[in-house]
């Protein structure tokens, strides 16, 4: 069974939010921070750290 990545991420995100119940501002900061870091000069360093 092939599940698209975007669908798996949505399911994991919704379940994680319902189980942990973090404040919405924290979710927004994490999402915005990840989006901004993805296009920054730190992206290659983060990618190397994650893929090792």
Image (spheres, grey):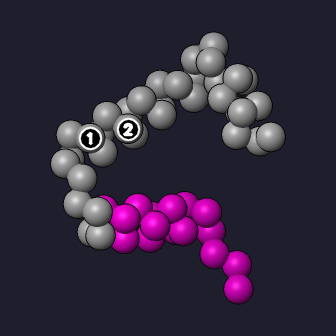
Left-right relation of 46 to 25: right
Q: Residue at x 52, y 25 (%)?
A: 37
Left-right relation of 52 to 42: right
| Spatial separation of the CA atoms under disc 1 and disc 2 | 6 Å
Residue extending furthest toward the top: 41
Label 2: state its secondary structure.
helix
- Residue 39 is situated, as x and y percent measured from the top left of the image, at 58, 23
Residue 30 is marked as: 2
Magenta region includes residue 16: yes
Quadrant in which residue 25 is drawn: top left
Quadrant in which residue 30 is drawn: top left
Quick one: 22 or 31, which is closer to the camera?
22
Left-right relation of 2 to 38: right
Label 1: state its secondary structure.
helix
Q: Which residue is mark 1?
A: 26
Quadrant holding the C terminus: top right
Residue 2 in the image: above or below residue 44: below
- Residue 46 is situated, as x and y percent measured from the top left of the image, at 66, 29
Q: Are marks 1 and 2 in contact (CB under 8 Å)?
A: yes
Magenta region, main secondary structure? helix
Bounds of the magenta span?
A: 1-17
Residue 49 in the image: above or below residue 21: above
């Amino acid at each position: 069974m092939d599940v698209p990545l975007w669908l798996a991420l949505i399911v994991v995100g919704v379940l994680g939010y319902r189980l942990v119940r973090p404040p919405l501002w924290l979710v927004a900061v994490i999402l915005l921070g990840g989006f901004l870091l993805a296009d920054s000069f730190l992206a290659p360093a983060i990618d190397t750290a994650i893929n090792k």
